[in-house]
Image (tube, grey):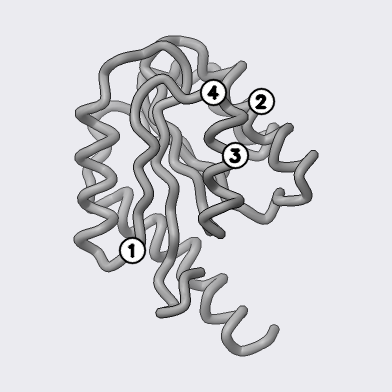
Amino acid sequence: MDPTGRIRVVVAKPGLDGHDRGAKVVARALRDAGMEVIYTGLHQTPEQVVETAIQEDADAIGLSILSGAHMTLFARVLELLAERDAADITVFGGGIIPEADMPELERMGVAKVFTPGATTTEIVEWVLRNLGEAHVEEAAGT
């Protein structure tokens, strides 16, 4: 959480996919909802994403993956967070992700996956509902 108490989210485009319009739209929606958003840009490695999240004291990482490498990229980000003792950073994402992969992503620890057609309102509300509660508990010392 940043010093003002706002939720901090790193929005990242890991891998070789060069389509970032959706990530930018989500980043802007989160920002417009009052969150502190750090957009990493294109072609980030999982290592770069995790390093940014730790350096920025992020509450969450939102991954945008359209390349089909979602199983590998989500798994690596989660693995690196665990290795860096930062597994408390919530990982969510979206993109072209088959329904059949959702249970495995959830088992890995991905908090939420938004599929094509998800609205920015839906994403913002999910982040506020899931991360906002953690902020209230943290502020209360529970």
Q: Closer to the camera: disc 2 or disc 3?
A: 3
Q: Position of residue 91 (x, y in %)?
A: 55, 43
Total number of numbered labels?
A: 4
Kindly identify the amino acid type of the residue bearing the numbered disc 4: Thr
Give the CA separation, mark 2 to mark 4. 9 Å
- Residue at the location (45% across, 16% down)? 98
**Amino acid tagged 2:** Arg
Q: Badge 2, how many Cα within 10 Å: few under 14, some, many 20+?
A: some
- Considering only order in the chain, which callout, 3 or 2, is on the residue closer to the N terminus? 3
Residue type pointed to by label 3 = Val
User: Label 3: which residue?
Assistant: 50
Q: CA distance from mark 4 to mark 1?
A: 24 Å
Name the element at disc 4: loop
User: Which residue, as the protein is rendered here, is positioned at the far front?
Assistant: 55
Q: Which residue is mark 1?
A: 35
The disc at residue 56 is: none
The structure residue drawn at horizontal position 28% and vertical position 27%, both measured from the top left corner, is: 116
Who's the residue at 71% across and 51% down the image?
86
Q: Earlier in the sequence, mark 1 or mark 3?
A: 1
Corner quadrant of residue 18: top left
User: Taking 47 as reference, is 66 left or right?
Assistant: left
